[in-house]
Image: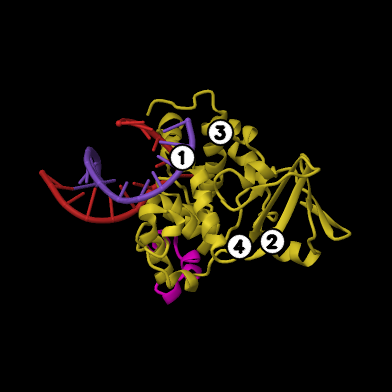
Chain colours: A yellow, B red, C purple
Amino acid sequence: MEYFVKGNDVIVSEPHLDLAETLDCGQAFRWRAVESFYAQTFTGSFLDAPLTVSQMSPGSFIFHSTSEEAFLSLWRDYFDFSTDYGRLKEVFSQDPTLAKACAYAGGIRLLRQDSWECLISFIISQNNNIPRIKGIIDRLCQHYGGKFPTPEQLAGEDPDSLSYLRSGFRAKYICDAARRVASGETDLKAIAESPIDQARAALKEILGVGPKVAECVLLFGMHRTEAFPLDVWMKRVMAEYYPGGFPEFAQQNAGIAQQYLFHYIRTGSPVPEPAV
DNA sequence: CGCCAGGACGCCC
DNA sequence: GGGCGTCATGGC
């Protein structure tokens, strides 16, 4: 990644990033595509810091109205610009299926999201579809002035008072997660630094957090790249291409490989629904 | 009407 | 330990 400051903007060059692939692949739910002069423009936020970012051409980006300080302290980390995805994809591509997935969706990066927002978002995601997940999170943030609520704010709610979300049976899960995090019973910062199996167990103490949601929180909200969410699509990938297990050389970054494979199997594979 | 959506829970055996 | 019905909501 290279960057320079131009007026109020930061201009970024990074060949291994595609904005639409990264911001709209189901790892984050609060980025919105907006009309603009550029090829693609998205607005969103991280830790209450808003951002409008455009892709001018492949590998070329404008971070609008962004100071160098904000870019370096917030967005460089959020977009994981310090990781060499070219090198990662080289390693992955030893495997023929991963090679195809990387070639197909090579602009995906693993965003370093906030663990609390991720926890609530993926609790909401269970047995749900992406447009509706986005709608529920929209209503949630709208209710708190456009910002994602803090654990303390949500801890004061109960499932009935959350009825405006129309989140169904998930409301009680949201309340339990908020209560635990606000009270300190669940320490997300400590979990993020714990051995992975200990971290999994701690997350699954929360009502409504099972294996899949725990892996998503570890991967997307704690940047534990060895976490490996297995949804129905990835189970198909495993049965079809990796019956003997996932390649060992990719296991340290299995979660990132999973992102490429997930996108590939859903939209780019010649066999979108292989027999399980 | 049915089925499905980046699942988890409670109960059964 | 695996199998199955149930849990809200909305789109198709």
| A217 or A54: nearer the viewer | A54
SS at badge 4: loop
Q: Is residue B8 left or right of residue A4?
A: left
Q: Is residue A252 visible?
A: no
Q: Residue at x 57, y 39 (%)?
A: A260
Where does residue A275 sit, x and y in percent of width and height? Answer: 39, 25
Mark positioned earlier in the residue sequence (2 or 4): 2
Both on one chain, marks 2 and 4? yes
Q: What residue type is disc 3 on?
A: Tyr
Q: Is residue A76 magenta?
A: no
SS at badge 2: strand
Mark 4, residue position = A146
Q: Quadrant of the C terminus of chain A?
A: top left
Residue A264 is labelled as: 3
Q: Is residue A250 left or right of residue A14?
A: left
Q: What residue type is disc 1 on?
A: Phe
Q: Residue at x 35, y 63 (%)?
A: A205
Q: Chain of mark 2?
A: A
Q: Is residue A42 depicted above or below A187 in this figure?
A: above
Q: Chain of mark 4?
A: A
Q: Label 1: how many residues lie within 10 Å, few (<14), some (14-19) or many (20+)?
A: few
Mark 1, residue position = A246
Of badges 4 and 1, the one in the foreground is 4
Mark 2, residue position = A50
Of badges 1 and 3, the one in the foreground is 3
